[in-house]
Amino acid sequence: MRRIILLLMVILVQTVVVAEDAFGNMAQQAEAAYRKGDFETAVTIYQQLIGQGVKRSEVYFNLANAYYQLHDLGHALVNYRRTEVSTPRDEDLRLNLARIRVQRLDGTSTEAGLTGQIVKLTSDWLSPLELGWLVVLLWWTFCGCVATYFWRTVWRSILRWAIWVSAVLFICVVCLALIRIIVDTSLKPAVVITDSVSAMTGPGTNYLEIFELHAAAEIRIVEERNHWIRFQLPDLREGWINEQSLEVI
């Protein structure tokens, strides 16, 4: 039995090593193409890596850079936003996000409503994993303060305040995490990737056009019907566009 387990472990390690070597080779090819100015080839290689299951922030970031060099603001913003999910505080990423949002034809707009502002605030500073670990940390801090309160009677005057503070912080962070999960699940974020698309009053071209969106416009998906998407803008305006005009983050 030990030999079988050891053999499986060796096979697993070898598989990981081979996969890392393949990733390194393809990444080097993409970087070389990017440095030569062959951005189309760089995009193709990075897309192949993602298609093979490589979901690393540096791959999304480099892919976004290549799209930006091709003046494809929509696909660039999608991949910058995907990078933001795991590395929200990266300064280079923030600079590139701001650059695209200034350049796009639809301009910049702030999130309307309290829930939208809360989601924007937490996503700018914490990844979902970091937010989850913060909840766990505050919970164990609260439990530790309560346990110590009953164990060390001489510290009770101080621990009483520590319990209240940790409890309030825990409840606040849990509320922030729940709001973010609910909003991102029920209203999935997406980006317009086509140069322009008409927003309709209903799911089809036979409805009335109400306004036009352009590449890199950020929206949230409200409803899907017959390959049409009912979306919501940060300013809470709504409409319908064809699903081929956007990519989900």
Image (cartoon, rainbow, N blue to C red):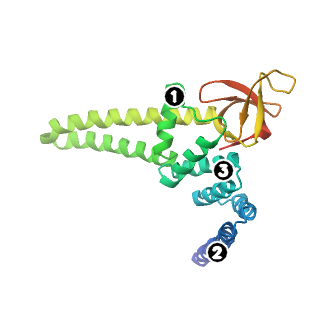
* Alpha-carbon span between mark 2 and mark 3: 27 Å
Give whichever of discs 3 and 1 has the lower sequence position. 3
Q: Which residue is mark 3?
A: 76
List x then y, in percent, for residue 240. Answer: 76, 28
Residue located 51% across and 49% down the image = 94
Indicate which disc, 1 or 2, sits on the residue closer to the N terminus: 2
Query: Image quadrant for the C terminus?
Result: top right
Q: Which residue is mark 2?
A: 21
Q: Which of the two residues, 220 or 169, is positioned nearer the viewer here? A: 220
Q: Which amino acid type is marked by label 3? A: Ala
Q: Which residue is denoted by mark 1 in the rendering?
A: 115
The secondary structure type at the circle numbered 1 is helix
Q: Give left or right: position of 68 versus 112.
A: right
Q: Quadrant of the N terminus?
A: bottom right
Residue 177 picture location, percent across and down: 48, 37
Q: Quadrant of residue 206?
A: top right
For discs 2 and 3, the disc positioned in front in the rendered view: 3
Mark 3–mark 1 Cα distance, whole angstroms, equals 26 Å
Q: Residues within 10 Å of mark 3 (few under 14, many from 20)?
A: many
